[in-house]
Image: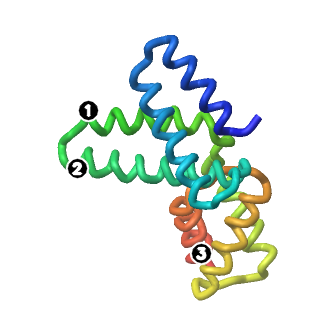
Amino acid sequence: MPLIDKIQQAITAAMKARDEQRLSTLRMVKTALKNREIEKMAPLDDKESQQVLSTLIKQRKDSVEQFTKGGRQEMADKEAAEIKLIETYLPQAAGEAEIVAGVKAVVAEMGSPTMKDMGSVMKNSMARFQASGLRVDGKQVSEVVKRELAGK
């Protein structure tokens, strides 16, 4: 079942349960998916839908950071709750250990890359995670790559 259909079912359930916060978040997600579908002028496949959701999560993380800096904790908490809900529709996120192992494997495959090769290491690492179906944060992968390459 396509992701947008799952979200529509969840919207219906949230309406019946009168869960306003969940309902508004799901509607926002559905709108983002529909907008992307309209831009593309074709139905989205699951990978494209996941990219849209990842973008939404990234936006929410930035908002949490800004609200926390601005002393608006109630807004930061609302955004954090939205992140948790959106993440339920995405594949499992890779943990720190999995990221480190993936980056080490890419570094080993490439021989002995230096900091100059960081771009290619990042590209290969992200491709590896994408192929394995794991969801990773590019910022976190970048930090691990820097640590691995700094040790050389």
The local crowd at label 3, few if under 14, some if 14 to 19, many if 20 or more residues have their Cα within 10 Å, is few
The quadrant where residue 117 appears: bottom right
| C-alpha distance separating marks 2 and 3 | 34 Å
For marks 2 and 1 on the same chain, the one whose residue lies earlier in the sequence: 2
* Mark 1 or mark 3: whose residue is earlier in sequence: 1
Q: Which residue is mark 2?
A: 69
| Amino acid beneath label 2 | Lys
**At x 40% / y 21%, what residue is drawn?**
20
Percent position of residue 114, x then y = 63, 85
Circle 2 packing at 10 Å, graded few (<14), some (14-19), many (20+), is few
Q: Which residue is mark 1?
A: 74
Going by the image, does 42 lie left or right of 55? right
Q: Which of the two residues, 17 or 129, is positioned nearer the viewer here?
A: 17
Q: Secondary structure at mark 3?
A: loop
Which disc number belongs to residue 151? 3
In percent of width and height, residue 53 lies at 56, 47
Amino acid type shown at disc 1: Glu
Q: Residue at x 57, y 54 (%)?
A: 36
Q: Residue at x 61, y 70 (%)?
A: 148
Please tell me how many numbered marks the rendered image carries: 3
Give the vertical position of 106 relative to 83 (above or below).
below
Q: Quadrant of the C terminus?
A: bottom right
